[in-house]
Amino acid sequence: AGGAISFKLEATIQLITDVALDVKLLTPALIKSTLASKPLPIPFSDTGLKVFQETAFTAAYVGQMTK
């Protein structure tokens, strides 16, 4: 389900016209299956990132693994 933030992000992405963006939407099922077959190589706690950054970090990792 979309919320206010996701709608604003979508609008922002659509309004960017001067650069080519490679936007990829990751479904929860794709994230789960990718992490099952290619788990994170280190525990998230070892990254030094904040707890609230874990979802973005995981999405970026899955995005790289599914290229």
Image (spheres, grey):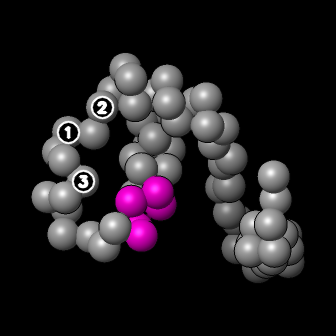
Amino acid type indicated by mark 2 = Pro
User: Which residues are drawn in magenta?
Assistant: 52-56
**Hey, what amino acid is under mark 3?**
Phe
Residue 44, labelled with which disc? 3
Q: Position of residue 19 (x, y in %)?
A: 70, 73
Q: Residues within 10 Å of mark 3 (few under 14, many from 20)?
A: some
Residue at image location 18% in from the left, 69% down from the top: 48
Residue at image position (30%, 31%) is 39
Q: Is residue 54 magenta?
A: yes
Please name the residue that numbered disc 2 is placed on. 39
| Mark 2 / mark 3, whichever is N-terminal | 2
- The residue that label 1 is drawn on is 41
34 shown above or below 59 = above
Looking at the image, residue 6 sits to the left or right of residue 63; the answer is right
Taking the image as drawn, is residue 17 in sight?
no
Q: Nearer the viewer, residue 38 or 14?
A: 38
- What secondary structure is marked by label 1? loop
